Image (spheres, coloured by chain):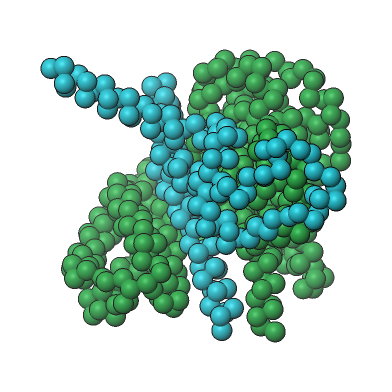
């Protein structure tokens, strides 16, 4: 009995943590330290750890180069992807709150359209990217 | 030459090129140590810079026909709910990136990417009618109350992303006095088709120029750079301390009464047809995931072909929701051609093995489609006969 209650509690805690983790992103609740943690160490400014202020000359001379490839290889957290469950959770909550107050806030037609639009946009961007790559390679 | 043209094309339209340009500016001209990456100033100033960039992008998107063509898709939702936030125009990313280049002189690209994502995500919760107002936070944050005014036609106000201070400073703020169930475009699209939704405003502008007596190629081009909303340039920073007119809404209230808008509905409505569209959407979703997982193993023509088929499928499904005869014909062609493709194994990419049951499944789909078609057409014709009888009966009584 105790085991099952403990399991239930653990499950509930895990579920609430998951909901909190995914929905907090929708409210800008990410601290600067958390962002810095996900940065590769070479991008965390070494001059600042010593507390020394940089002269204007050194600002222009001592520079690090960051390219698009560096950004993709740095494996930065994809907040949009991480927030997808949050979208669903809030939509479901909104739907039920509306129903509880006697309002239908979602229509299948409309919901269908926004889904189509999301995927349509995605494929258009994908298609353009492939086309440009093909032409550039040729 | 062609390569240079395509590079230019990519520079103009590619959202990734926006980020490449950002990186280039930061690497070559950025004042890299001025605001240390690990200081809180970097976080706060970057939050403000990304939000200010969004404000100006959004304001321009409403001001010019060119950028409104891409952004109007977001405003086409007549139901105002969280899902409205996810309804984005396919071409919007191509018009926004120039507005984010100024922060490149001060802020690290990696942190900028994270802040830009959070800025976009931070605009999700404001697309709702279930939150009335949030008290003193209305002075600082862009809230559901402020954003509802933005989505209520004509809606050329409250352009902020996360912080409403930009609207208050630049003179584009309009407070909500009463919540009204009236959202969407002033002249609503007449389709659920995502392809047409993305092209509708372009089509309308071409029609506008087409009606003129003297029209040249230049007049078609200049039409897109004409203003559709006019905002005089105002900068009043102390406006952020001004009182917002008291909002009579409580925290949790919905607009009373029924909607004041006649929403776009299908011409032909049947439960089976809707269920079919939902099922087909799920199949398309599955195919999309399959494409993404195996994209690297496919050749370019295979990837282009698959992406095109999926886009056309979404377009046809949207048209099915419209319920037009053309949609029924297009879906018949689509199911038949896919069944033909899989039955005779005409699409066999090496990098993505197609399971054998696909052929059988595609044939079953043809059957399911014909049942759906027959039932929905029959029910539509009987309901239209009833309507005719009612109309005739009505005229006799008169």
Please report the residue visible at 65 percent of the width from the left and 21 percent of the height from the top.
B137
Tell me the quarter of the image containing the N terminus of chain B.
bottom right
- Please give left or right for residue B109 compared with residue A83 in the image: right
Query: What x and y, as percent, mark residue B80?
Result: 53, 36
Q: Which chain is cyan?
A: A
- Please give left or right for residue A25 compared with residue B394 in the image: right
Observer-nearest residue: B54 or A136? A136
Observer-nearest residue: B59 or A46? A46
Please report the residue visible at 69 percent of the width from the left and 55 percent of the height from the top.
A64
Residue B234 lies in what quarter of the image? top right
Please report the residue visible at 60 percent of the width from the left and 19 percent of the height from the top.
B134
Query: What x and y, as percent, mark residue B112?
Result: 64, 46
Q: Is residue B135 above or below residue B332?
A: above
Observer-nearest residue: B384 or A131? A131
Please identify the residue farthest to the front as the structure is shown. Answer: A50
Q: Is residue B162 above or below residue B348?
A: above
Please report the residue visible at 80 percent of the width from the left and 67 percent of the height from the top.
B219
Query: What x and y, as percent, mark residue A131?
Result: 54, 74
Query: What x and y, as percent, mark residue B113?
Result: 61, 48
Observer-nearest residue: B33 or B335? B33
Q: Which chain is green?
A: B
- Please give left or right for residue B111 compared with residue B66 in the image: left
Residue A96 lies in what quarter of the image? top left
- Please give left or right for residue B300 compared with residue B271 in the image: right
């Amino acid at each position: 009995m105790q085991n099952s209650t403990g399991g239930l509690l653990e499950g509930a805690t895990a579920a609430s943590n998951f909901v909190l983790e995914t929905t907090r992103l929708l409210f800008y609740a990410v601290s600067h330290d958390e962002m810095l943690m996900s940065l590769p160490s070479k991008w965390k400014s070494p001059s600042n750890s010593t507390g020394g202020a940089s002269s204007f000359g050194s600002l222009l001379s001592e520079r690090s180069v960051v390219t698009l490839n560096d950004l993709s290889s740095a494996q930065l957290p994809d907040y949009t992807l991480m927030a997808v469950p949050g979208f669903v959770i809030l939509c479901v909550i909104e739907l039920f709150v509306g129903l509880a107050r006697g309002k239908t806030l979602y229509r299948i037609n409309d919901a269908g359209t926004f889904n189509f639009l999301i995927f349509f946009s995605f494929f258009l961007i994908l298609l353009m990217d492939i086309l440009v790559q093909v032409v550039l390679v040729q | 030459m062609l390569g240079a043209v395509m590079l230019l094309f990519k520079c103009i339209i590619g959202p990734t090129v926006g980020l490449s340009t950002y990186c280039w500016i930061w690497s070559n001209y950025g004042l890299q140590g001025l605001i240390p990456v690990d200081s809180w100033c970097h976080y706060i100033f970057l939050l403000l810079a990304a939000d200010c960039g969004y404000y100006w992008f959004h304001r321009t998107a409403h001001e010019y026909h060119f950028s409104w063509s891409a952004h109007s898709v977001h405003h086409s939702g007549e139901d105002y709910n969280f899902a409205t936030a996810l309804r984005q125009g396919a071409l919007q990313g191509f018009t926004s990136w120039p507005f984010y280049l100024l922060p490149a002189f001060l802020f690290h690209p990696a942190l900028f990417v994270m802040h830009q994502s959070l800025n976009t995500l931070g605009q999700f919760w404001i697309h709702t009618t279930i939150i009335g107002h949030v008290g003193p936070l209305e002075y600082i944050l862009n809230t559901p109350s402020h954003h509802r005014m933005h989505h209520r036609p004509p809606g050329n106000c409250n352009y902020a992303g996360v912080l409403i201070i930009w609207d208050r400073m630049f003179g584009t703020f309009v407070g909500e006095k009463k919540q009204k169930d009236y959202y969407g475009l002033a002249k609503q699209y007449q389709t659920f088709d995502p392809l047409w939704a993305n092209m509708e405003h372009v089509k309308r502008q071409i029609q506008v120029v087409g009606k003129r007596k003297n029209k040249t190629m230049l007049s078609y081009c200049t039409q897109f750079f004409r203003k559709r909303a006019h905002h005089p340039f105002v900068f009043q920073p102390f406006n952020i301390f001004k009182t917002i007119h008291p909002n009579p809404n409580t925290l949790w209230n919905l607009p009373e009464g029924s909607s004041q808008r006649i929403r776009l509905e299908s011409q032909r409505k049947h439960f089976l047809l809707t269920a079919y569209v939902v099922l087909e959407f799920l199949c398309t979703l599955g195919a999309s995931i399959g494409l993404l997982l195996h994209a690297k193993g496919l050749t370019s023509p295979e990837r282009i072909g698959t992406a095109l088929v999926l886009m056309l499928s979404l377009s046809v499904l949207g048209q099915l929701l419209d319920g037009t005869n053309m949609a029924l014909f297009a879906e018949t062609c689509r199911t038949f051609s896919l069944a033909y493709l899989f039955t005779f194994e005409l699409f066999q990419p090496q990098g993505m093995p197609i399971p054998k049951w696909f052929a059988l499944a595609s044939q079953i789909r043809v059957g399911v489609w014909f049942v759906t078609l027959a039932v929905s057409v029959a029910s539509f014709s009987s309901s239209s006969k009833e309507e005719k009888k009612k109309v005739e009966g009505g005229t006799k009584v008169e």
